[in-house]
Amino acid sequence: MTPEEFRRQAHALADWMADYLRDVGSLPIVPRSEPGQVRRALPARPPEAGEPFERITADFRELIVPGMTHWNHPGWFGYFPANHSPPSILAEMLTATLGAQCMSWQTSPAATELEQVVMDWLRGMLGLPDTFSGVIQDTASTATLVALLTARDAASGPLERLTVYASAEAHSSVAKGARLAGFGPERLRTVPVDGTFAMDAAALAAMVAEDMAAGLVPACVVATAGTTSSTAMDPLREIAEVCRRYAVWLHVDAAYAGSAAILPERRALFDGVELADSFVFNPHKWLLTNFDCSAYFVRDVPALLRTFATSPSYLRTTNDPDVVNYRDWGIQLGRRFRALKLWFVIRSYGVEGLRAMLRRHIAMAETFRGWVESEPGFVVPAPSPFGLVCLRHEPVELAGDAPRLDDWNRGVLERVNASRDVFLTHTTLGGRYTIRMAVGQWQTGPEDVERAWRRIVEAAAIERNKLHGVP
Amino acid sequence: MTPEEFRRQAHALADWMADYLRDVGSLPIVPRSEPGQVRRALPARPPEAGEPFERITADFRELIVPGMTHWNHPGWFGYFPANHSPPSILAEMLTATLGAQCMSWQTSPAATELEQVVMDWLRGMLGLPDTFSGVIQDTASTATLVALLTARDAASGPLERLTVYASAEAHSSVAKGARLAGFGPERLRTVPVDGTFAMDAAALAAMVAEDMAAGLVPACVVATAGTTSSTAMDPLREIAEVCRRYAVWLHVDAAYAGSAAILPERRALFDGVELADSFVFNPHKWLLTNFDCSAYFVRDVPALLRTFATSPSYLRTTNDPDVVNYRDWGIQLGRRFRALKLWFVIRSYGVEGLRAMLRRHIAMAETFRGWVESEPGFVVPAPSPFGLVCLRHEPVELAGDAPRLDDWNRGVLERVNASRDVFLTHTTLGGRYTIRMAVGQWQTGPEDVERAWRRIVEAAAIERNKLHGVP
């Protein structure tokens, strides 16, 4: 395909893309396809000869798009958002066109330096002190693994004696990362949570002291700022004090909620974060930046480099101390030019525009929470300081019957999602099946949140009628 | 930014992108910027209010593009290529627009199933048996770490007794991966290479036997199919036989050269690969697919899942055995829709079109090699079965003076790259500074290869004149 043919196709796709962004709200969020359906519709072997591009894009529209789950549908309330935005998509177009591999300064000076600049911007926006340095990782799973590996190597003791601590509500990537980093399963301590699902810092202190007395070496505490199940905030200052006392690496996983640290009125929730050793949050979740873009901040850069730097002859470039080679800041050697989309997003919206977007989401979540709380039979089992509201329907007929209530809520959620114009997911909170409503898509408006609530109330009513034999 | 405003900007960028692809050959490949130059040109703080999009794209054109290293310039002969192509860029535009997070089947059925389909296509194109299953990883560094972790967990022995083997020419990501996976530095065995820089399989067999006799547990051999320094091919069949005999996991790192396995006439070089336990190659290097896209094939999927699967409540979806959740096939939970670009590339070019492109690159490299070999004073110190040719200039005046010859070749390379219309990099081969010429960019033509050779000959002549005091 020549550049001129590319031009023609790119213009055609630009229109499709704009149409998609305009119309995505009218698509079923979750496809009707059965497992294997898309696969069976595609040939088992690749074509020997090239095909006309129009045939490929037609298949994209007719086979792929109807089989997609539309994460950027305005009725998306599942998981956490992976929101994007027009400026971010536009930046991705340019990143793809440059096709640069940004492993070191020399292989893309502007990409490296723009990453330094936007990470400094973000650091300031979050209120982190400039003792932190930033690097873009792909995901929070990777960033947490990076923190665990750095902490492992920085700890003074043999691997089999090193211990890691995280709350019972920590993300699955913590246990997975600890396992991958070679910590034995019995060396990952699960710290209990309080009634708000936040880590019990006193219990942490006791566990650390006990382990040290037993000759073990506490290597890392992973605190969560905004747990996946309920956005519970672990008490960062208290945890940091424990970590300081015992010289343990503190990693803060703020994958979703970290974006809210740009709001002065939410900053207090992150009190103590400046004492952490590393901090991760995902602009690709709630800061309008395309997946993947995970912002990792670390204080002890030499410790990071001791774990990740390599310097083979074929990569050696310059010894200029002004030069940062981000290939030495993580697992991957190769790196995409991800800073560009963050730069486009921050400049397009401005810090105030981003704050306004987050406030709008939080306000919609608060309104939704009010509706749930004032509706008989519904409960909100956890605080909701951000855009996520947890809820359960507990009709009087099933009062106290936990297993049936779990099935009941599962049934309600399935009925809600069958509408395919809203999509919510679930979790287990305090052992109970719980519906999660996460507001955070860039095009989501009050009418979408209202529709979700209406679907929930309708679904609960239909299930109740079934319970009473009403047809 | 509304969808209609997006439309306007996307059309404007489509033209810029097509112009860039058409004109990139006239840009300096490597920028003239000094370390810190781009950074200093950008404000230290983000804007509070949003800025007009035109101002952002103007800054992109005026500050960022001139500071980039242009990996897709037709004069790019550095490192290995990270080539892209128009259909791949177009697919990236769509991936960005959908903004889907493809961690599990349910979160994007079509993306998951398209990944299964294109990985099956690739497997067939490479001639791998269908006992292998494929998954897209971001980079070969990650895929090699994935293999090392799986091998570590599958080995029967405590971590401190496990050993890993790779040749002295293996990529730096092997030593880094082994370190990250917790293998002690003294547990990574460096197997010697023969005169062609390929692993000495007899030496490997002896080392494995010796280690076992000493009570150690050989866990993983990483063979390289196409080393980074010189594209040496480790003898896969002999290595695989050692691995089979001692039940050691064999991972084949074919990051660059793996693409050439789609050529029937190059298939013999990969003889024995079907006996490997895992195999990685990067379509983002030499198969016209945008970075990042690393194809990882593994035979023992249950072993992979034992190392990487998690199943927290908030991610649990379906138990359908037809369903693959790729989040369980690697480190990251979140995943981009990378299969789309591979699908677009394979269909746009067809298998024959891709073969034709590789053959064109290989033929240009062979022509170049012929020029080097027939030019007095130049040597080609290694075989060049693919698109990479290694070379050194060894003027008679410096015969036998290795340190001065190293400096000499460094000087020649710097002079060549100062032209900024071709770009080559170096390595150390057999302890000697060696220039690498890697042909593999999609727009590279004979005139670009000729220009590179002319620059090299000119640079050598100028350096020689300096040696003789000729002004």
Image (spheres, coloured by chain):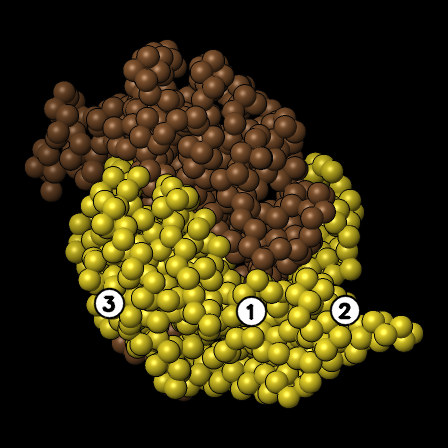
Chain colours: A brown, B yellow
Q: Please, what is the three-letter code of the amino acid marked with disc 2?
A: Arg
Please give the residue where the numbered disc 2 appears in the rendered image: B415
First of labels 2, 1 by sequence position: 1
Query: Callout 1: few (<14), some (14-19), or many (20+) C-alpha neighbours within 10 Å?
Result: many
Picture disc at residue B81: 1
Circle nearer the viewer, 2 or 1: 2
Q: Please, what is the three-letter code of the amino acid marked with disc 3?
A: Glu
Q: Please, what is the three-letter code of the amino acid marked with disc 1?
A: Pro
Q: Which chain contains the residue that carries disc 2?
A: B
**Extreme residue in the right direction:** B471
- For the residues marked 1 and 3, what is the alpha-carbon distance in whole angstroms? 32 Å
Q: Quadrant of residue B380?
A: bottom right
Q: Secondary structure at mark 3?
A: helix
Q: Residue A157 appears at what percent x and percent y?
A: 39, 26
Image position of A101 with respect to B306: above or below: below
Please give the residue where the numbered disc 3 appears in the rendered image: B241
First of labels 2, 3 by sequence position: 3
- For the residues marked 2 and 3, what is the alpha-carbon distance in whole angstroms? 46 Å
- Can you see residue B63? yes
Residue drawn 11% across the image and 42% down it: A471
